[in-house]
């Protein structure tokens, strides 16, 4: 099989529309019905709802209090828009953070979640995030572990990375297989 990977000159939100176009086309070619999209504030999630009409869209965001205690970064208005268009929003703790981050912050040491995240970042921030959100969605029961999905994430704002993968639950993380890298920044 021969497929095409698109490399962007720069990471960031200016790639979002092209990422969505590439992902939609590949979803059609592979008959993939579910797209998992990372979105912190919800702007990318709203755009995804337009771009992926007819597909199941799961938007994954930070847990409550991620940036600041007692706050949610995914805005109420964006939540309303996404849900009104049939999107699913998953608000959850990052699989590479949570208690690992607490240990790092308290004891100034790194543990396995930090190390796995850093290794994945060798391929780019977006590659780390697509793996993370797919596993988070599997753990929440929102995606199956025996069906391919397209996972989309970015570096900072917007989207610049898309992959085809089959999600796994977090306890099976090392069985995760990224089957295709559709696009990513070329750093």
Image (cartoon, rainbow, N blue to C red):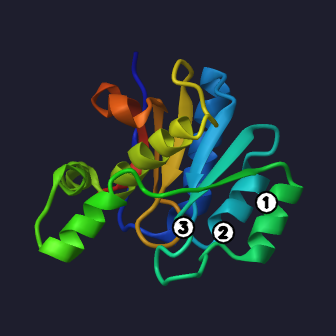
Indicate left or right for 75 with 72 as reference.
right
Q: Is residue 133 above or below residue 79?
A: above
Q: Residues within 10 Å of mark 3 (few under 14, many from 20)?
A: many
Judge whether residue 176 can be spotted in this image: yes
Q: Name the residue under label 1.
A: 82
Residue lying at 66% horizontally and 69% vertically, measured from the top left: 42
Q: In this view, does 80 lie above or below 65?
A: above
Q: Cβ–Cβ below 8 Å for labels 1 and 2? A: yes
Indicate left or right for 80 with 67 as reference.
right
Q: Mark 3 points at which residue?
A: 158
Depth check, mark 3 against mark 2: the one in front is 2
Depth check, mark 1 against mark 3: the one in front is 1
Q: Earlier in the sequence, mark 1 or mark 3?
A: 1
Residue lying at 80% horizontally and 75% vertically, measured from the top left: 77
Indicate left or right for 49 with 118 as reference.
right
* Of the pair 103 and 54, the residue shown nearer to us: 103
């Amino acid at each position: 099989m021969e497929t095409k990977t698109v490399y962007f000159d720069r990471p960031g939100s200016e790639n979002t529309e092209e990422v969505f176009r590439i992902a939609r086309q590949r979803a059609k070619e592979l008959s993939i019905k579910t797209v998992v999209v990372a979105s912190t504030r919800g702007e990318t999630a709203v755009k995804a709802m337009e771009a992926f009409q007819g597909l199941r869209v799961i938007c994954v965001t930070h847990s409550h209090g991620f940036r600041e205690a007692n706050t949610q970064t995914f805005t109420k208005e964006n939540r309303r828009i996404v849900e009104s268009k049939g999107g699913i929003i998953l608000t959850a703790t990052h699989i590479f953070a949570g208690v690992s981050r607490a240990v790092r912050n308290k004891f100034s040491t790194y543990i396995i979640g930090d190390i796995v995240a850093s290794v994945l970042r060798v391929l780019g921030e977006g590659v780390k995030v697509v793996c993370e959100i797919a596993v988070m969605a599997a753990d929440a029961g929102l995606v199956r572990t025996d069906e391919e999905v397209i996972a989309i994430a970015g570096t900072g704002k917007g989207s610049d990375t898309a992959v085809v993968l089959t999600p796994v639950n977090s306890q099976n993380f090392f069985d995760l297989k990224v089957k295709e890298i559709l696009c990513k920044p070329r750093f």
